[in-house]
Image (cartoon, rainbow, N blue to C red):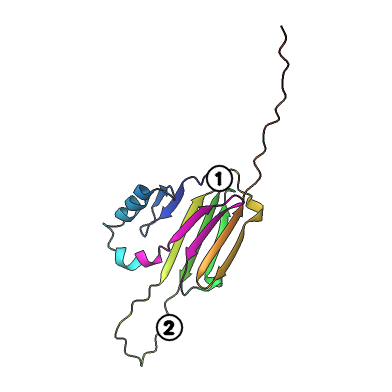
């Protein structure tokens, strides 16, 4: 069973349903931001993710450079939605410093993915290493139906 639809929350707070593996859905999500005045400021906070299905698990990897694990939250909502969120705070400025250029972004981000029925919600694990968050959602074994042969008479 493949991953089903996911969600993308825009800078304007609207939620867009999308399929993680559809390029058309990705393009429309990006185009939805083109009219936003906050595009330049908020786009860096939309972290790139990779959704992969292995025989044993659904694996999500999110690039979160410069964030500490304490600044990131991983949650399961309504026993079916994986939510990855976080916040990078503005660094304290020293009044005596002269800033020549600031390109580091700050603010909040959130990504949501609807998990398939075979996900083991109680066994989800998350790890963060070198700015990459890996969330592993084990898959339940698909129970094969009991097949009882029926003898044909006649």
Specify the farthest residue to the bottom. Answer: 96
Q: CA distance from mark 1 to mark 2?
A: 42 Å
Marker disc for residue 141: none
Specify the farthest residue to the top. Answer: 154
**Magenta region includes residue 49:** yes
Left or right, 153 with respect to 105, comes to: right
| Residue pointed to by mark 1 | 116
Which mark sits nearer the N-terminus, 1 or 2?
2
The residue tagged with tag 2: helix, strand or loop?
Answer: loop
Query: Which residue is rendered at x = 37% and y = 52% of the image?
Result: 26
Q: Nearer the viewer, mark 1 or mark 2?
A: 1
The count of marks equals 2
Q: Nearer the viewer, residue 51 or 110?
A: 51
Query: Which residue is rendered at x = 67% and y = 35% of the image?
Result: 144
Within 10 angstroms of label 2, few (less than 14), some, or many (20 or more) residues? few
| Label pair 1/2, CB-CB below 8 angstroms | no
- Measured along the vertical axis of the image, is residue 30 above or below residue 66? above
| Residue pointed to by mark 2 | 92
Image coords of residue 117 (percent x, y): 58, 43
The residue tagged with tag 1: helix, strand or loop?
Answer: loop
Question: Which quadrant, please, contains the C terminus?
Answer: top right
- Measured along the vertical axis of the image, is residue 120 above or below residue 68? above
Q: Which residues are magenta?
A: 43-65
């Amino acid at each position: 069973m493949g991953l089903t639809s996911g969600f993308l929350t825009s800078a304007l707070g609207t939620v867009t349903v999308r399929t993680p593996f559809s390029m058309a859905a990705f393009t429309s999500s990006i185009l939805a931001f083109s009219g936003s005045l906050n595009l330049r400021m908020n786009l860096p906070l939309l972290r790139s993710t990779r959704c992969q299905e292995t025989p044993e698990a659904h694996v999500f990897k999110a690039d979160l450079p410069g964030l500490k694990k304490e600044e990131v939250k991983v949650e399961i909502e309504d026993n079916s939605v994986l939510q990855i969120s976080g916040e990078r705070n503005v660094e304290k400025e020293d009044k005596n410093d002269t800033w020549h250029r600031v390109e580091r972004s700050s603010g909040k981000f959130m990504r949501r993915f609807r998990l398939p029925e075979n996900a083991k919600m109680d066994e989800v694990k998350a790890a963060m290493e070198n700015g990459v968050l890996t969330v592993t959602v084990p898959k339940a074994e698909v129970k094969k139906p009991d097949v009882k042969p029926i003898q044909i008479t006649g």
